[in-house]
Amino acid sequence: MIAIIDYGAGNLFSLKNALDFLNLKNIITASPEEMKDADKLILPGVGAFPDAMRMLERSGLKETIIEESGKKPLLGICLGMQILFDFGYEFEKTVGLGLIPGEVKRIKAAGLKIPHVGWNDVKIENACELSKGIKKGDMFYYVHSFKAVTEKKHVSLSSEYGDSIPGLIFKDKVYGTQFHPEKSGDIGLKLLRNFGALK
Amino acid sequence: MLAKRIIPCLDVRDGKVVKGINFVGIKEVGDPVECAIEYGKQGADEIVFLDITATHEGRGTMLDVVRRTAQNVFVPLTVGGGIRSTDDFRELLLAGADKVSVNSAAIRNPAIISEAALKFGSQCVVAAIDGKKTAEGKYNVYINGGRIDTGLDVVQWAMEAERLGAGEILLTSMDADGTKEGFDIDMLNAVCNVANIPVIASGGCGNLSHFTELFQMTSADAALAASIFHYGELTVGQVKEELKKNRIPVRIL
């Protein structure tokens, strides 16, 4: 059972639709007990870093996520990926979940439109369980204005947008995608299937 | 490198695609869900539904179409047509739309853009603008399906929509629409030159070279087309192969 964590940030149904399509059992939940019972967690998110952290703190789910992240695979998507890091700088410096060392900063891409919206190709920096079957040049759908700044060893897939954008990051059982696998066609579904197959 | 997007648009009335198409392998001719699935297989980067339903019952049918599409097609889905309030946004987003496009209502009440952007995020607010050239060589914004000239300048309104929080601009040329003589390069350039958000070009494409021309002569981010895909004259895949040949970055399946 995959628990999709519902903390009030964004639309969870697209993700649920994709998991249902793949026959991956899932539940949208705000309950710490269900998160503890699940064998995997997904942390979605659309919106701003400070709001997301406030909502996680207010709901008391922050501690549960940190605690469970050592025990079972966790996948953060988009803003859900960004808050896996130590700090974010959207509007104000905000402490994140601190599960992967690094920070989240505004994309610097001179002459390019911000947000970075659309399909961008990836290159493989480091193979990980979720990048299985994904090749250089495969494209994923992005919508974001901020990017992760982290050590190269934590980056599995990256895209170029004036700047190198980490697309898939990982550390131990914690994974994150800046792109939306649930909106990235067959290749995105492949990544979600890889996540579903994790032990 | 960011790919240029190819976006098929389906006009939907009372839950059925207008002027039923006949894709090979489709069970129910005119079912928007089946059409969207087919477009997804062809490599559509996004799907747009334009709801031209007039009745209240039809709105409910549209929500069901969106719901079923979102369960089966995993690329971004935009829905527009008759959007009047942020409640309309909410309903469509909850049904599975990723973006909602707003046209006439935003002219009457520009705050709908800022309110929707604040509530749901700019990424899901598409400002749809229908423009037509004036005798003085400027471009005016038309509403109500092109029936009313608002007198507003297209470039000014595009900048205002961006300032209010729109995440993308869907720019349709009333002059080019239906002509099959190519996109309205001049009007697109006028808007692309000032916009800091993606611009989706719509209206006028009639053959493969029009897509290449669009991306070589403007900085538009995406091309939207209805009839050329609708009647099976071209597939999304064919358009992308042609663009690739011309060294324009696209997503090839």
Image (cartoon, rainbow, N blue to C red):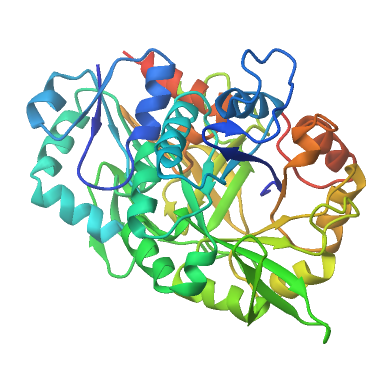
Residue B184 left/right relative to A55: right
How many badges with numbers are in the image? 0
In this orientation, which residue lies closer to the viewer: A196 or A31?
A31
Q: Locate residue B242, reporting x and y percent.
A: 88, 38
Q: Is residue A176 above or below residue A27?
A: below
Question: Which image quadrant: the C terminus of chain B?
Answer: top right
Image quadrant of residue A36? Answer: top left
**Residue at (13, 33) in percent of width and height:** A67
Q: Locate residue B11, reporting x and y percent.
A: 63, 41
Q: Can the viewer see residue B46 in this picture?
A: no
Image quadrant of residue B235? Answer: top right
Q: Locate residue A146, reporting x and y percent.
A: 44, 58
Image quadrant of residue A18? Answer: top left
In this orientation, which residue lies closer to the viewer: B46 or B113?
B113
Residue A114 left/right relative to A198: right
Residue B31 left/right relative to A194: right
In this orientation, which residue lies closer to the viewer: B116 or A121?
B116
Q: Locate residue B127, reporting x and y percent.
A: 55, 63
In this orientation, which residue lies closer to the viewer: B214 or A192?
B214
